Each structure stands twice: as C-alpha cells, then as structure tokens.
Image: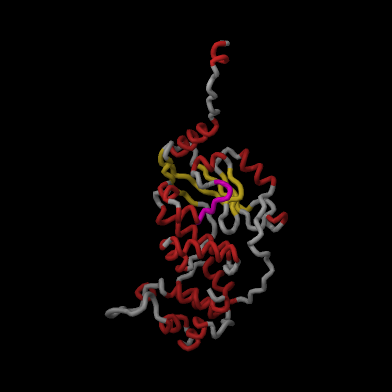
Amino acid sequence: MREENRLGTYLRARRELVAPESVGLPVHGMRRVPGLRREEVALLAGISSEYYLRLEQGRDRNPSPQVLEALARVLGLDATATAYLHELAAPRPRSRPRRSRRRAVPRETAQLLEVIGLPAVAVDECFDVLAANALATALAPSLRVGENRLRSLFLDPAEQLLHPDWAQCAPQLVATFRNRLGTDVDDPRVVQLVGELSLASQEFRRAWARHDVKPPRGKAVRIDHPQVGEMRLWTSKLDADGADGADGADGVMVIVHHAEPGTADAERLALLTSLVAEPAVQPQTPLEAGSR
C-alpha cells in the first residue's frame, strides 16, 4: 500500500461496503460498482464530488476534522474506525521503534502465566506467541512460543477444526490486528506477514481488504476440543506489565481463556486442567517391580 494514499485506500474500501439503501438512496437497475459511488458519498457528506475524488486519489491530504466526521457518518464508522480515519489523515511522524525488534515478556507476566491456572498466552502486535503456559498448549497446540495466531488461524487446518465459529472469529482477529497496528503497516515484519497470508489464504485477503478496525475486547469463543469436547470460553485481554515501553514490552498483550463458573464448560476446562496436571506414569523395571 502506498503510504501517501492510505486515506484514499481506506475510503474506497469502506464505501464499497455500504449498501445504497442503507443510507436512503434508491436503487434502480444494475449498479456497476459495489457499495456507494464517489459522488453519492460526496453528496451525503455535504462536500463536492471533485473534492472527494481528490481525497481518494491522494491529491488532497489535509481534510478538516469536520469533513472526516461527515465521511465517517456516511460510511457508518463506529468510534474505533472513526479514530482510525482521523489517524490516517494526520501527519505521521515516526517515533515508535520498528517491529523488527522482538518484544520482551516482562518477568512478572511470565510468572503470571505459570501460576494463573488457566490457559494463557502473551502475544505481540503481530500476534506472535511470546509466552504460553502448558494449559494453553493443551487447549490448542498452536498456542506455543514461536507460532503466529494469524498464520495458525488462516493456514492450519487443524487449528480451524478447533473453532466451530471460524468464519466469524478469523476476520475479527484481522480487524484487531489492524487496530493494534494503527497506521504503521509498512513495518517489514507486517509487510512480510500480510504478504504471506494474502498469497496463501483467500479468506485473509478478503478480510484484509475490508479494512475493518476493532479493539481487542474480550469475547466468548467456542472450541471443539478433541479430548474434552466443545467448550464456550471467554477470552480476556490485557496489556502486560511494562507495556508502556519499558524493557521492550511495548505492545505485549496477555490473552486468558476462562469458563463461566458452574457451567458444563467449566467442568470440561477443569477436566483438561486435570489431564495436563496428571503426572506421566513411568514404566517399572523388573528390578523395581520385584522389590515390592
């Protein structure tokens, strides 16, 4: 994506998702373009068609906050997407370090993962798994250090089988990925990951092209585990201690899976916990067996 025209790319992608009838426009016959036409967006936003064309083509890079708010209203953007739109239109001084540097998991966070008693992982902005406890790996084998959640979810058939609602949760992860990146999508790690997934997965290409932006909120997910059966687990997400930039922890997020107490889901998660905690039975040697 050309850096100087990110605003135009975003506007075009979002207007193509707006049905004309949803904004009160009559539809007659076949339309040659998906969603809204440029002139329709301009009309509804109260700006000239020529000015809107300049915005999409990257020939005007300084729209006023009032224009951006009008465009957000026409395009049906929520608060997160509207903030993203303003960020795209703002000057972009680069003050953050490049993501080629691996993030560090604070020691306290690593300790938390080991004692929390629930499946938990720590990930960076690109959703690389930086730390994971044994329960997390037992819940899903791809929840282990060195794996990438986007790569696993879109490219690993075994991972997809774990998620009965994969068609909904995979695009949601892409939208959260965009939100965590902000406008910093030209980072080498991001470019490499997006390029790989775009070539290998049509579903990822479609989700990425929508330019959806969603904050990392906790939600319920269904997991069809081969040992304990289907569970509905909540995912809670929080910034790691030190995520303000200290010790390279900026951008590290902890994801914890937990079940509602007193439910069958909690019983299944407890069963999985017992399987992980169960010590392996060591075979006896003939000498050991005879000494009893």
Q: Is residue 72 above or below residue 180?
A: below
Q: Residue at x 65, y 44 (%)?
A: 110
Residue located 48% across and 68% down the image: 211
Is 113 located above or below residue 96 in the figure?
above
Colouring: secondary structure
Horizontal side, residue 240 vs residue 69: left or right: right
Give the total of numbered labels: 0
Residue 26 image position (x, y, % from top left): 32, 79
What is the quadrant of residue 192 in the picture?
Answer: bottom right
Q: Nearer the viewer, residue 177 or 160?
A: 160
Q: Is residue 41 magenta?
A: no
Up-down relation of residue 187 to residue 163 (above or below) = below
Q: Check the image and name the residue furthest to the front.
A: 286
Give how far across and how far down residue 61 sits, in percent: 57, 82
The residue at the far right in this view is 246
Task: Please give the name of the residue rendered at 51% of the width and 85% of the height, measured from the top-left corner.
Answer: 54
**Whole-percent x and y of residue 12?**
46, 76
Q: Residue at x 67, y 55 (%)?
A: 249
**Prevailing secondary structure class for the magenta stretch in the rendered image:** loop
Give the residues drawn in magenta, as a range. 144-150
The location of residue 139, given as percent across then percent down, is 49, 42
User: Which one is nearer the viewer's eye here, 236 or 203?
Assistant: 203
- Quarter of the image that includes the C terminus: top right
Image quadrant in which you'd find residue 15: bottom left
